[in-house]
């Protein structure tokens, strides 16, 4: 026992040491932007066609990448005469965030068509950089707004009608801050402006609030923070100067570049952890990254470089540093690869995007459950003349007592399943008043970035098993269980959020009069979220959800398409448990504590459904159908709270709806074959229409059934809560014995486990 304890202690020490180990920052190389004669190119400026005989990027002081990583922008104190002075320049890349694959550097496009630039001075009527040069650049709102800083302390704002296309740039305004400012940065939501100044070897960060996102027409100073008090040690007259300030997307980390203006020595990037996002007063120094090894004597024939500005890729996995060289040295852009997002000293995570994914997955669960149930209502309406509305024989087997109990309500016998949609039944068996059905659904959603969230892809697969029955001519009620797996990949990050859901749906028809009725659904869901970082599980969160949906319908139809009006109302309440995202178990990072939260969401929709007349062929009946709705999202802003481990400061992430106005359209085909096979296919798109972000969700719903008039039974067995075991089986009665042929597959097992068996049984 002592040996075991000692081994465990030793293992814990080793694992702890590994987490605390310093992160590696790998220099990949440097690039001379195209247009330099030393590169062997013959390039002309795309703006005016003048030959470029010097560096495309001369004396760069800042660098910014586009969100997709295919464009690199630099702010230059000088530039080639052909491009005019004081240029903001742009170069295109062949591979996202890989500057070493620059098209111009490889010489694959000698016309330099992949280069462009803008002259802020000319665009502003000499208001920008009249007496100085450009030294700072910030791009906000997904590439729709550019800010430039000149050496006399003016910040100019430029708007772009097409994201990142500098040819569409127009000047709006400028603000004068004084010539002590060396760098600037905006919060992701554009409501805060940060300036860095260090004219007296004393780096100071000043924070301003803005009246509206990226509106610099009026600024209000919040506070000033002397970074000497936060751990940056700068001695008087040392010529150490703060050249750049950067933040990670959610503002939980701040980075300050310090470099010496006299020598190529003393080059560091300091990383700070902010107890409250974008609040510099809560900054705590995590450490510093030493750049001297890179910029001092990399090769014997190269001059020492001096770093002047930096920028991260949108996922935080790469760092770019621009350097200037004295004399005849060639200025370059350096690329560094990081182990984790913004991991110069410590890794960071994007909490706002994580929470946004959780909210969207929860909303998606409601939409898909109600969509499936309402599709069932329409199936029943189109087949209301049938006494039995079986769509598929389904068995649910589970070791979980609760699910096993519910499953019994859904089990069908071989006798019940013999009644078909066309009122055919075996003479020897009684028709069942209950009908059984199943649905499979696949949904793929694309959500572009918002002002606080990264873009994301969401994929959902679900299975629904239901049973319902008619009561007289006008009443109808049922119950259904849906299990779904949902994956939310946050683009431009190493994070993802996965969700499992199990939902109980109770539904029915409420008659209003002879021709009008309401389809009603009440749903209860249990949710489980898995938070992942660099592919590893870092946290688990549970959730509960209750929702209701009402669909107003009429039996009257109009025209050859059998159009019927439809109105829908949905309301839901979701409660999420507290949890801790243990990012530190993967890489050195600060863990995030998420508070218990409850939020509401809802929507109102109106439109029409259509149902073409039956197409009867020798093989069966074909029924095209579909619908179109205008959907108004009435979800209020959702505010979720979290904090950094060890900090008393609470952060709030405000999750806004992607679009208030939306369109939901669907089209489907329902087939009932003479041999008893039923097939229903439906495609549905949910499209945002009042946002410049191209966000949408595509859903595919599939229903397959088989109705046999033999003494046999098909079954699909599924256990989602225990082992995710699936089984497809065929049972036939042979002289009083049940002969069962089955196969099984475990979704939960990392090692595929396929099996087949034959069982023979009889009841005495």
Image (cartoon, rainbow, N blue to C red):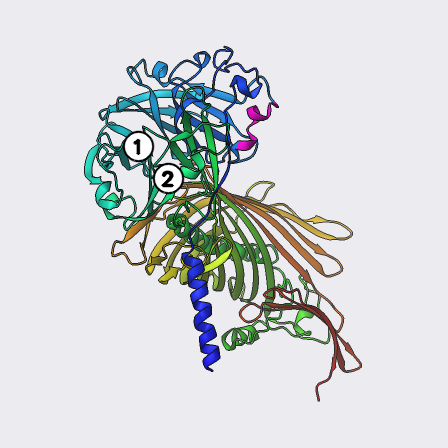
Mark positioned earlier in the residue sequence (2 or 1): 1
Q: Give me the C-alpha separation between circle 2 and circle 1.
A: 19 Å
Residue 274 percent across, percent down from the top left: 29, 48
Q: Which residue is drawn at 58% across and 65% down?
A: 748
- The quarter in which the C terminus is drawn is bottom right
The image shows residue 176, relative to residue 650, as above or below, that is above
Give the dominant element type of the magenta stretch: helix, strand or loop: helix
Q: Which of 221 and 100 is in front in this view?
A: 100
Asked if residue 86 lies left or right of residue 565, the reply is left
Residue range of the region highlighted in magenta in the rendering: 100-108
Q: Residue 107 colored magenta?
A: yes
- x%, y% of residue 48? 48, 11
Mark 2, Cα crowd under 10 Å, few <14 / some 14-19 / many 20+, is some
Residue at x 49%, y 35% (from the top left corner): 69
Q: Which mark is residue 451?
A: 2
Residue at x-position 25% and y-position 54%? 649
């Amino acid at each position: 026992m002592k040996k075991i304890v000692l081994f465990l202690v030793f293992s814990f020490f080793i694992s702890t040491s590994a987490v605390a180990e310093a992160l590696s920052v790998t220099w990949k190389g440097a690039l001379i932007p195209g247009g330099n004669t030393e590169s062997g190119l013959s390039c002309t400026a795309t703006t005016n066609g003048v030959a470029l005989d010097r560096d495309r990027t001369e004396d760069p002081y800042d660098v910014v990448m586009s969100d997709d990583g295919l464009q690199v922008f630099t702010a230059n104190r000088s530039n080639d005469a052909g491009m005019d002075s004081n240029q903001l320049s742009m170069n295109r890349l062949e591979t996202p965030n890989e500057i070493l694959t620059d098209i111009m550097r490889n010489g694959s496009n000698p016309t330099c068509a992949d280069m462009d630039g803008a002259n802020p001075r000319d665009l502003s009527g000499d208001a920008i950089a009249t007496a100085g040069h450009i030294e700072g650049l910030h791009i906000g709102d997904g590439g729709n707004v550019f800010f430039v800083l000149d050496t006399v302390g003016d910040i100019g704002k430029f708007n772009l009608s097409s994201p990142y296309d500098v040819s569409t740039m127009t000047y709006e305004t400028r603000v004068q801050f004084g010539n002590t400012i060396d760098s600037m940065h905006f919060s992701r939501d554009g409501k805060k402006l940060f300036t860095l100044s260090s004219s007296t070897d004393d780096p100071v960060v000043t924070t301003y609030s803005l009246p509206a996102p990226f509106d610099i027409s009026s600024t209000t100073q919040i506070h000033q923070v002397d970074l000497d008090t936060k751990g940056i040690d700068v001695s008087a007259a040392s010529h150490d100067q703060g050249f750049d300030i950067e933040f990670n997307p959610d503002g939980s980390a701040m980075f300050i570049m310090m470099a010496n203006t006299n020598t190529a020595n003393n080059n560091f990037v300091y990383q700070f952890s902010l107890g409250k996002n974008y609040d510099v007063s809560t900054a705590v120094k995590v450490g510093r990254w030493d750049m001297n090894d890179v910029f001092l004597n990399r090769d014997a024939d190269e001059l020492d470089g001096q770093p002047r500005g930096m920028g991260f890729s949108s996922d935080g996995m790469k760092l770019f540093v621009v350097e200037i060289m004295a004399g005849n040295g060639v200025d370059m852009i350096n690329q560094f690869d990081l182990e984790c997002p913004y991991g110069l000293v410590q890794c960071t995570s994007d909490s706002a995007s994580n929470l946004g994914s959780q909210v969207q997955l929860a909303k998606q669960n409601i939409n898909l459950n109600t969509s499936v149930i309402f599709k069932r209502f329409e199936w029943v309406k189109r087949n209301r003349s049938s006494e039995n509305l079986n769509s598929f024989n389904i068995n649910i087997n589970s070791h979980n007592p609760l699910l096993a109990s519910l499953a019994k309500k859904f089990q069908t016998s071989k006798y019940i399943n013999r009644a078909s949609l066309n009122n055919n039944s075996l003479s020897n068996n009684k028709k069942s008043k209950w009908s059984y059905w199943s649905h499979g659904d696949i949904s793929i959603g694309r959500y572009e970035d918002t002002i606080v969230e990264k873009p994301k892809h969401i994929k959902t697969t679900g299975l629904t098993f239901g049973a319902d029955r008619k009561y007289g001519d006008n009443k109808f009620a049922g119950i259904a269980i849906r299990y779904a797996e949902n994956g939310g990949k946050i683009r431009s990050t190493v994070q993802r959020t996965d969700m499992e859901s199990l939902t109980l749906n109770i539904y029915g028809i409420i008659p209003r009069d002879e021709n009008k009725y309401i389809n009603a659904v009440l749903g209860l869901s249990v949710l489980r979220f898995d938070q992942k970082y660099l592919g590893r599980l870092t946290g688990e969160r549970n959730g509960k959800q209750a929702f209701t949906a009402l669909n107003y319908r009429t039996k009257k139809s109009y025209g050859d398409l059998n159009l019927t009006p439809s109105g829908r109302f949905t309301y839901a309440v979701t409660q999420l448990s507290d949890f801790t995202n243990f990012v530190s178990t993967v890489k050195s990072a600060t863990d995030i504590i998420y508070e218990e939260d409850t939020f509401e969401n809802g929507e109102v929709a109106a439109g029409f459904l259509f149902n073409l007349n039956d197409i009867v062929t020798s093989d069966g009946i074909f029924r095209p159908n579909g619908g179109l709705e205008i959907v108004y999202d009435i979800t209020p802003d959702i505010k979720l709270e979290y904090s950094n481990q060890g900090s008393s400061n609470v952060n709030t992430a405000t999750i806004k709806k992607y679009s208030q106005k939306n369109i939901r359209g669907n089209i489907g085909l329902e087939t009932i074959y003479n041999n008893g096979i039923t097939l229903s296919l439906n495609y549905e798109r949910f499209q945002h229409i009042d946002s410049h972000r191209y966000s949408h969700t595509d859903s595919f719903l599939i229903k397959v059934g088989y109705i046999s008039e033999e003494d046999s039974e098909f079954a699909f067995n599924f256990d989602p809560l225990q082992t995710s075991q699936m089984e497809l089986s065929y049972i036939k009665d042979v002289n009083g014995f049940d002969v069962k042929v089955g196969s099984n597959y475990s979704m939960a097992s990392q090692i595929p486990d396929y099996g087949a068996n034959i069982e023979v049984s009889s009841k005495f």
